Image (cartoon, grey):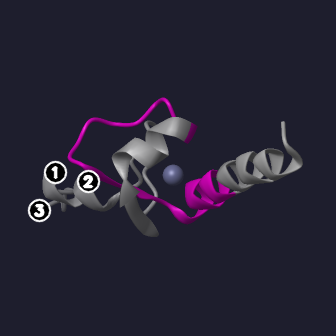
Amino acid sequence: MAERHSKKETAHVCAVEGCDKPVHKSLSRKKIADVFSNLQPGGRHAGLCKDHYKEYKKKTKKERELERLGW
Ligand SMILES: [Zn+2]
């Protein structure tokens, strides 16, 4: 018998479309959608893998820095 991935497991992978890495951090979908426009459909919360979470943090940090500079 070949083992197959059950569909339930996909709830614990990154919400960014095309990415199937395990979730590192769960965040509000609204917040993530500001950074990633290609999110898979789901509930109010969405998980990001380590890499995408890093990217998310980087982008949100940049915005904050720009605000501080008065842009
Ligand atoms: Zn990812």
Quick one: label 1 or label 3, which is nearer the N terminus?
A: 3
Does 39 lie within the magenta span? Answer: yes
At label 2, which amino acid type do we have? Thr
Q: CA distance from mark 2 to mark 1?
A: 6 Å
Q: In this image, 59 relative to 14: left or right?
A: right
Q: Quadrant of residue 8?
A: bottom left
Q: Where does label 2 land, which residue? A: 10
Q: Quadrant of residue 17?
A: top left
In the image shown, does 15 or 21 lie closer to the viewer? 15
Q: Nearer the viewer, mark 2 or mark 3?
A: 2
Secondary structure at numbered mark 3: loop
Q: In this image, 70 relative to 55: left or right?
A: right
Q: Where does label 3 land, which residue? A: 1
Magenta-highlighted residues: 35-57
Q: Split into 4 quadrants, where in the image is the N terminus?
A: bottom left
Q: CA distance from mark 1 to mark 3?
A: 18 Å
Which residue is located at x 39 percent, y 59 percent? 27
Are the residues tagged 1 and 3 within 8 Å (C-beta)? no
Q: Where does label 1 land, which residue? A: 7
Residue at far top of view:
37
Q: Is any part of residue 16 visible from this angle?
A: no
Secondary structure at numbered mark 1: helix
